[in-house]
Image: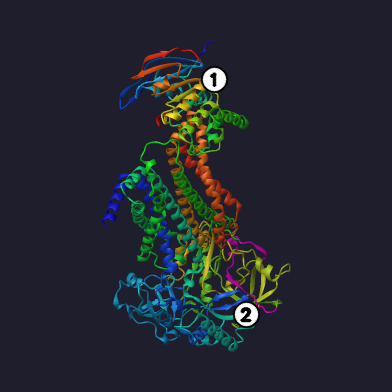
Amino acid sequence: MDALLRDLRFAIRGLLRTPGFTAAAVLALALGIGATTAIFSVVHAVLLRSLGWGDESRLVSLRTDFMTRHLVGFSLSVPEYEDFTAAPFLEAAGAFADGTAALQGERAERVRVANATGSFFKTLGVQPVLGRGFAPDEDFKGHDEVALLDGTAWRRRYGADPAVVGRSVTLDGHPYRIVGVLPDSFRYGGTREFYVPFGFTDEQRLKQRGAHYLEGVGRLRAGLSPEAAQAALDQLSARVRAAHPESYAPEQGFRFSTAPLRDRFVGSSRQPLWLLFGLVLLVLLIACGNVANLMLARSASRQREFALRSALGAGRARLTRQLLTESAVLAVMGAALGVLIGAWGLDGLLATAPRQIRQLADIRVDRAVLAFAVGVTAATTILSGLLPALRFSRPDLAGSLKEGGQTTAGVSAGRLRSMLVVAQVALSLVVLVSAGLVLRSFASLLRVSPGFDPAGATAARLSPGGPAYDDDDSARARFFDEALRRASALPGVEAAGGIDRLPMEGNYRLSYFIEGYQPPSGEPQPSDAIRRAMPGYFKAMRQPVVAGREFSLSDDARAPLVALVNQAWVRRYSPGREVLGHRIRLDTKRPREGEWRTIVGVVGDAREEGLDRPAPPVYYFAAAQSPPDQMTLVLRGAVSPASLREPLAGIDPTQPEGRIDLLDEVVANSLAPRVFPLRLLGAFAALALLLAAVGIYGVTSYGVTQRTREIGVRIAVGAQPGDVVRLVMGGALKVAGLGVAIGLASALLAAQVLSSMLYGVGARDPFTYAVISMVLAAVALAASYLPALRATRVDPMSALRAD
Amino acid sequence: MTDTLIRMQDIEKVFLTDEVETHALSNIHLEVKKGEWLSIVGPSGSGKTTLLAILGLLDTATGGEYLLDQRPVRELAASDRAHVRNRHIGFIFQSFNLIGDLTVAENVELPLTYRGLPPAERKKRVDEALARVGMSHRARHMPGQLSGGQQQRVAVARAVAGDPLILLADEPTGNLDSKNGQTVMKLLSELHAAGSTLIMVTHDPAYARLATRTVSLFDGRIVEESGSSTAA
């Protein structure tokens, strides 16, 4: 222990004596550990940390699959949810549906509200901290005017007043009595202010097997093997299909399925997060390489000291321990600064993260992250300290203790350092190629036309709710018409229209029939994205009408029913044939909705599901003939969001303001999941490049110092400055070239993981690989230029002075 | 036409350190004729190496005039000085100064490379130079594989390969045992006998006596000159 303390004291004293070396090493480690810690915080919170609802292996999402429609992981209808609640392989099952509602008070406000069954909270094991949960009968209409308050909303909105239980709140015009307050920590992929029952009706329970809108969650019985669970699920699917053949025609390929509940939150983030974590570990390795290199250089200059210690009796283990202690002190200092950088960087990271990741979990530097940082520190100590320790713990006593040598260079330490830089360059290339491919992919996406003109248009959301609108199609239609009339009258508006769901804001599919169209054998009737549009919408979007006409004011509720389709629809169902005049109708028995509608126009394709997905078939109904629950007005022209608020708010003061965005923000939002990894990769690439450049500079500079005599000899025998520059920069280029060669092979393998994240560019894109290789070569040249310049100034007298 | 290769007039070298002037050389007058072998002797710190560095254009005098082959060198740019060193001067260092990463042949070839000679010419000259010092059989060895005496013979080969006007040797036997020292001195004698002009710094009076002329330095001044300035 005493020896260890002595080593520690000596290490600290030595590091303080060389502040430049210490600062460089600590900074490199801090940046590497900081970036790693920040990313691990996200990985841990999203992918590793317990969901906090007990045994996670038993928690599953309850889903329906319609295999022939390629609908996998679909939501549940009320009868399907009840099928699950009765299934013996589940210990508990609940239902949930996300949404918003108008909170009526002094001023109407739109808040996040979710519908949930009482069993939803029981399934997750969540107990209210105040009051009670929902009783079983409160799931049903007539007993459903109760609400649970989110813990955070309780503090913010009610000042944590315990008397809140029993108070009334009005949501979408309906009164609810608050019966309980949920814990602060409860979040189900985000927070909501209120949870209210669904208020299932008998009709929904008995007749609406086709109305899928519930998100099911279940807890498997303890001890149930995955095989037994699957068998029970298959049994349930077969039984339900047999009992309700009218709802589940064989050609639909219906079945029930489950998936780990965590997948519901993680979704498509899993792969990018692991990828980012892998790449940040590479950056950490590069940083370790830098520190190892610095330590090798420092140790090389201490050879006489080690030889002296060895001559005085220090064994190899003793010297190794001394060097590893120094490495550990550096790693601890780097880790302390790194965790601070990580915690600070995490805020910035989350600010750019997609909503899915931000809302998922409480992402922070917690005990687990700190434990990870400690592990990283230990690994860093070994990675950066072991090589110098092994290299210099066996000093050449005779050689080191006498001055001078006969030839100009000892090469083994230099080679070791060069190999480290080769590794750094190779790892940097992997990170840079990854960033380059993702950047190229993003650039490809930006070149994709969305099918409309997002610049210079504004989108305003309208969601009238409450007793005055819920069951009154004409009231909603009047609300939308009035909103469009007021918005159109604003100065600067060139065109205005509306649609229930903008492109890139999710799809809603309904089954329908096409007159004269028979689906291929074994396939169900078409089920495609449906939109309800108001007159002027396509003009406002600058989405072309390629045949026929768009909706007009005359397409009102009393007029003959009309529809539009897009070009993808024509290609799918009527290629090369005239579609105008053909008819379609919804697969529903509702009187007006289920009637035939005549196709009066074909519009251009819009990238409905994002720029990276092909345009799907879409059919459009006139909003006046099929009023939706919500509407988004699109206004083209110089209209500021602020100027829209007042005229829209005046339509019905009980309704809250809807969100108003610029249309190009809608496109930008759809790209957000790609921007997040792109920014991070960019930062990692910059860091990797910087560390590699520092590594190359360090090795070259050190090499020049070590080779001063050799360079002096070369100059003495007639080398011109250009010869010396070529010698030094050529050496750096050789090291970088070897690193690039190894890196290219590694990157080709690593990039395969990226394939699914790329668009419009292959994982083996030669352009990216070539440019990155050239960038690294240029960085190697730039990093070696200053040492090369210094080398040209070596005094040839050094050749004599060495004598 | 004259056979004077080197003429130094009132050469002075002053080092300025912390505002203190140190006169390393003062009032040096020296002439060396073609084919002459001059040895420079003197105690440590007398200025021998500084004088050799100025003679070899590794350093510049702070005063006086230095004509090498009748051309003044004072105003030469660094690249011109490198050019002159490469073509007209061959160096033999006390510590041999072979480059550890290069083979024996590559070390000898180095100044020829900087001269821009074609590969075939370089090879011919390297082979000849190594043959002159009896090291042809070690051409592919690395310097670390050679004894001190062998390394110095390779260094001599490197110095003569370019067929310079003058060979400058700084304590060429300083790092060698007496047997190897004698071998190297025999080699230098042979070179001189074959017509080479040599200027050698040495501590050893016995070796100094092999030269045709000896100048003694003390405190940066020539205090004694012996022998005649005639070529071999």
The correct choice, above or below, for A497 with respect to A712 in the image is: below
**How was this image coloured?**
rainbow
Q: Which residues are magenta?
A: A521-548
Amino acid bearing label 2: Gln
Q: Badge 1 is on which residue?
A: B194
The correct choice, above or below, for A708 with respect to A768 in the image is: above
Q: Is residue A361 magenta?
A: no
Nearer to me, A452 or A767: A767
Residue B194 percent location from the top left of the image:
54, 20
Asked which secondary structure carries label 2, the reply is helix
Nearer to me, A453 or A801: A801
What residue is drawn where x is 44% and y is 79%?
A: A116
Q: Indicate the quadrant containing the C terminus of chain A: top left, top right, bottom left or bottom right.
A: top left
Q: What chain does mark 2 sit on?
A: A
Residue A252: mark: 2
The correct choice, above or below, for A235 with respect to A369 in the image is: below
Residue A37 percent location from the top left of the image:
40, 59
Callout 2 crowding tier (Cα within 10 Å): few <14, some 14–19, many ≥20? some
Q: Is residue A31 visible?
A: no
Amino acid bearing label 1: Ala
Q: Tell me how many marks there are.
A: 2
